[in-house]
């Protein structure tokens, strides 16, 4: 067990936004909420998965919807605890042993910190993705047959309710419809789990990894190439492209940020081009018309100089970025993982090929 202070939260916000592959919400907004919560309530305890009891009960909390909406539709602040307590009361649990993030992402890595601080609960060092994905069934708990419901949902206006569904895909469909009616964003608490289920099905040590990534990116007075080398070594990643955004086509539809961006190569990639497709998160990258990375592997955009993560809602013409690729957690590379979050699920006519194999076919820098 250790405590998360302000510096740790700053680094976690950056690192989780990096792992969020463009989605998961604005890290700045989430960070402000988490910092305010620990300033008022004290630092949060972080437990490793090995420190929790098999029979104890845990509930995550997260934001659902289009991340771009948060830029204008700022949370009121008490929704996170309300939705958490609504589910706990419905389940009839006198004691909730802790909380954890459902995904690694800017806002969604911070919401459980707010809940933990306000309710004096420990945070568990795990999540359900090892990255961010746009739909509720796209979690490693689903891959092991754990139900998403009962699920609680609320909004900043005070609407709140409980869903029980026949399967996790129906959870996504019904909750997405409610989220659209709530203004394209909502707060949810779902996948109530035991300690034993977390140990078997969660992605472990994701908060610690996020903190390490954030510490590298935020380190001062270091050459960007040196930081990049250290970062890619930590995450077993690849630099796929250096470019300037020259076009962004983006819309908010059905509770998602949907679109694609075109990049024009700079530096080592001058005279080359890249196209990146996204649905909240970056999904597919094509370099000069050839696929170089695809979901469920991670596709991360960072600022060319600072290496700070670039989320899909902050894309703009002229911004210079580096495109990085990371292998997904092994749980996503199973048959069910690929069926759940592979390219064909999102409508792309590609068979999944691991990034390690794709980069052998396309010129890329591997550290």
Image (cartoon, grey):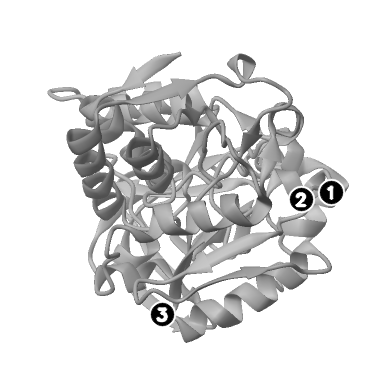
Contact? badges 2 and 1 (CB < 8 Å): yes
Q: CA distance from mark 1 to mark 3?
A: 36 Å
User: Residue placed at 18% from the left, 22% from the top?
Assistant: 222
User: Which residue is identified by label 3?
Assistant: 249
Decide which of tag 3 and tag 2 comes sooner along the chain: 2
Mark 3 residue element: strand
Q: CA distance from mark 2 to mark 1?
A: 5 Å
Mark 1 residue element: loop
Q: Say if 199 sits above or below 306 in the image.
A: above
Left/right placement of residue 174 relative to residue 2 reads right
User: Which residue is identified by label 2?
Assistant: 142
User: Which residue is identified by label 1?
Assistant: 145
Q: CA distance from mark 3 to mark 2?
A: 32 Å
User: Residue placed at 28% from the left, 73% from the top?
Assistant: 73
Answer yes or no: is residue 230 visible: yes
Mark 2 residue element: helix
Nearest the eye: 278 or 253: 253
């Amino acid at each position: 067990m250790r405590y998360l202070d302000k510096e740790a939260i700053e680094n976690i916000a950056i690192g989780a936004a990096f792992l969020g592959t463009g989605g998961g919400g604005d890290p700045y907004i989430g960070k402000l909420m988490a910092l305010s919560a620990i300033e008022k309530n004290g630092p949060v305890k972080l437990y490793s998965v090995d420190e929790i009891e098999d029979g104890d009960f845990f509930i995550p909390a997260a934001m659902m919807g289009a991340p771009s909406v948060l830029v204008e539709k700022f949370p009121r602040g008490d929704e996170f605890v309300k939705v958490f307590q609504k589910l706990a009361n419905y389940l009839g649990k006198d004691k909730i042993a802790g909380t954890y993030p459902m995904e690694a992402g800017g806002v969604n890595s911070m919401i459980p910190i707010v809940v933990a601080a306000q309710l004096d609960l420990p945070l568990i060092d795990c999540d359900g993705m090892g990255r961010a994905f746009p739909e509720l069934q796209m979690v490693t708990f689903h891959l092991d047959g754990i139900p998403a419901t009962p699920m609680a949902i609320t909004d900043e206006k005070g609407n709140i309710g409980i869903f029980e569904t026949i399967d996790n895909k129906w959870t996504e469909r019904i909750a997405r419809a409610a989220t659209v009616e709530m203004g394209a964003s909502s707060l949810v608490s779902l996948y109530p789990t035991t300690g034993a289920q977390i140990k078997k099905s969660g992605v472990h040590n994701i908060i610690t990894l996020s903190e390490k990534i954030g510490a590298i990116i935020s380190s001062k007075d270091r050459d960007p190439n040196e930081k990049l080398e250290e970062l890619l070594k930590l995450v077993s990643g690849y630099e796929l492209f250096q470019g300037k955004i020259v076009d962004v086509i983006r819309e908010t539809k059905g509770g998602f940020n949907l679109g694609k961006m075109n990049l024009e190569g700079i530096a080592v990639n001058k005279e080359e081009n890249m196209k990146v497709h996204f649905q909240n998160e970056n999904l597919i990258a094509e370099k000069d018309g050839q696929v170089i990375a695809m979901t469920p592997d991670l596709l991360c955009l960072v600022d060319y100089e600072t290496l700070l993560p670039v989320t899909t809602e902050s894309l703009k013409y002229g911004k210079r970025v580096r495109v990085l690729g990371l292998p997904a957690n092994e749980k996503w590379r199973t048959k069910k993982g690929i069926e759940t979050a592979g390219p064909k699920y999102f409508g792309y006519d590609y068979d999944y090929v691991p990034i390690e194999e794709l980069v052998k076919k396309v010129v890329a820098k591997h550290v």
